[in-house]
Image: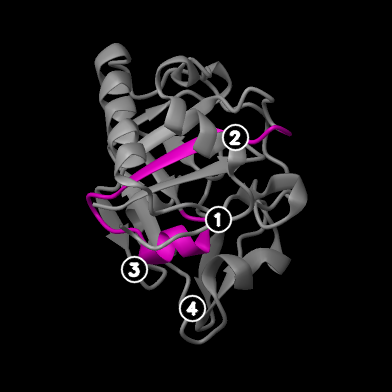
Amino acid sequence: MRIYFYKLTADNGGAPCVQDGFLSLAICKPMIRSTGEPGDLIFGFAANSLHRDNRLIYIARIRKKVHNGDYYREKRFASRSDRIYEWHRSRFSWRHGALHHGPKHLVHDLGRPPKYKKASVLLSTDFRYFGASGTAEYKSRFQLVKEAVEQLGRGHRVTHAERLRIELIALKQQIWKNSPKRVAGEPTSTPRRDVCHRSRSCGVLAKKEVVG
């Protein structure tokens, strides 16, 4: 099991998208979407620019990975707000009227045609999403997590010393025990098409290490 954690500078319902009983990562975070597999854990904390206390936004265990852009073709996902691309004339294009991103973000999200190597989507039904209602209470009990989150830069972190890994798992267990509802809050802000997680205004923050 890999454990990913990163900082979000935007929490607007796009990445992650929590809708109809499950959480999806379909846009932004291409490295996590490419390498994450069922069983892995993902922790999303707020960057200082979003919430200065680095509150916990969500935790999710990946249940399924949808490959090859099928998320944007299958009818069962048609109503989800992060399904912002569509298959048209043998290639993907940005869906007119979508709430997130725009045509210029397609290559970053899906990769270049014809292979679209980044077009993987992670799905979870085993998650806790807090959004704007998240707190930084974890800092009082999990000192190593606190230090790691506060020191995080751009990117994501996927490997950790054993003590940090133990604390992350313990944090997940505590959250599941104390928060039975999968959705406990609303996104911090409303969608904006000019916001993308690869920019400083909406970035994924931290360094990436080798799994230990």
Q: Secondary structure at mark 2?
A: helix
The quarter holding residue 199 reads bottom right
Question: Which class describes the residues within 10 Å of circle 2: few (<14), some (14-19), or many (20+)?
Answer: some
Q: Is residue 17 left or right of residue 125?
A: right
- Which residue does the numbered mark 4 point to in the structure image? 116
**For the point 59% across and 35% down, which residue is it?**
150
Q: Earlier in the sequence, mark 1 or mark 3?
A: 3
- CA gap, disc 1 and disc 3: 26 Å
Q: Secondary structure at mark 1?
A: loop
- The residue where tag 2 is placed is 150
- At a point 50% along the width and 83% down the height, the residue shown is 90
- Identify the mark nearer the N-term, 4 or 3: 3
Amino acid type assigned to the residue bearing label 2 in the image: Glu
State the SS at label 3. Answer: loop
Q: Which residue is farthest bottom?
A: 114
Residue type marked 4? Tyr
